[in-house]
Amino acid sequence: MKRDKYVDWLRALSLIVVVVWHWAFTILEWTPEGPSPTSPLGFTTGLWILTWLLQVLPLFFYVGGHVHLLSWNRACDRGVGIGAFVWRRLRALALPAIGLSAAWIAIGAVATSVFDAPAWTWRVVLLVLSPLWFLGVYLVLIALLPVALWLHRRYDVLALIWLGGAALVVDVLRFRYDMEWVGWFNMIIVWGLAHQAGFFYDRVVALPRRYDIGVLWTGLFMLIGLVYSGVYPGSMVGVPGEKWSNMAPPTFVIVALLIFQIGLVEVLRPEMERVLEKPAWKRVNDTINRFALPLFLFHTTGMAIALGIGWWLFGTLGGTIPPDLTWWLERPLAVLGPLICTLPVIYLFGRPRRNVEQVPDKR
């Protein structure tokens, strides 16, 4: 079957955007307890609007759901059971993350016990490993794949409506009745909805273009209404100093963001499919798909190495708070340095290989 290059592009691009965001917009504030991350969002008026485009995890879970459904259908044709299918996927994703975590925990243990490193060394280890949270959620969704497939077969689009309603109920309990703890249920409900929505990918692709535009505007109006209701923050990532976050845990705003992004990628589809057929873009697409997951896994390791080298050579570490003009002009270097330091780590430990998932083109 012909490979759906647009799916490959969306999946890899969503990971690359997360990596570049972390590299370019993380500011480390040093306190007696160690490094504390912040971002320019809390200091730059109106910059939060960019997160409506750059917070792409909803899109990643959406595409992931589509790929899982296709892969399961092919596994069924080969006679593979659901248990073996789920276990293989869990193992393929979990082992690299576990290996990376174990390596950094060992580094922290050796540094503190043998070399008498400061106690905040463990805070550094936690910061390096913190982006793996979403892989943990993704692993839970893979484990719940039998339930998700049953809901899809039995209730179809009603499953999405129920999940959306559940996410909204959680927000009501959280914001209206100050039940903050209940918000963590949305870690599975909201991301599970995005993953479940991927099962409808083929139907969305088949919609006439006017419906794509309609989906985009529906999501956009939902975002505007929810954000300017005064209940939800405007940023789609956490901002230091704000009482609430739309991401930790996720709120119903992320559902609106998902709808907006689905509409956006479908509106862009015809042009992007033409672009991705060009030989140069084919090579770019293939390369980023081979390296996207290893890059994500090791990008904070490379960032830690780059910051350590910068401190050793120049005696500087972290960033300027609030960010000034010089800080903004240095953003290309803030990406280049960690990239150079991450590539050797990928070469030694990442072992990128070609994506074995053949995603057939539906058009």
Image (tube, rainbow, N blue to C red):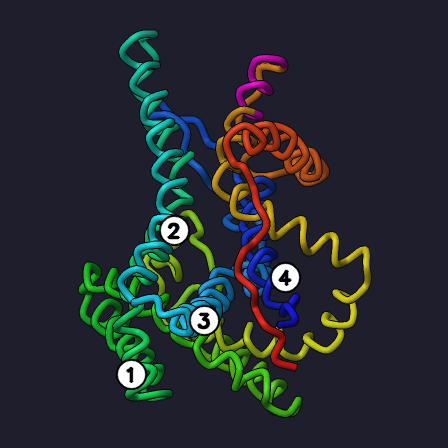
Tell me which numbered mark, 3 or 1, is placed earlier along the sequence.
3
Q: What element carries label 1?
A: helix
> Which residue range is magenta in the image?
306-313
Of circles 1 and 2, the one toward us is: 2
**Spatial distance from mark 3 to mark 1, Cα to Cα?**
28 Å
Residue drawn at the location 61% of the way across and 57% of the way down: 13
Residue ID for mark 3: 74
Residue under numbered circle 1: 162
**Cα–Cα span, label 2 and label 4:** 19 Å
Residue 158 position within the rendered picture, expressed as x and y whole percent measured from the top left: 32, 88
Which residue is label 4 attached to?
9
How many marks on residues? 4
Mark 1: amino acid? Trp
Image-quadrant location for residue 185: bottom left
- What predominant SS class does the magenta segment belong to? helix
Residue 61 coordinates in the image, percent (x, y): 45, 64
* Amino acid type at mark 2: Leu
The kind of residue on which mark 4 rests is Trp
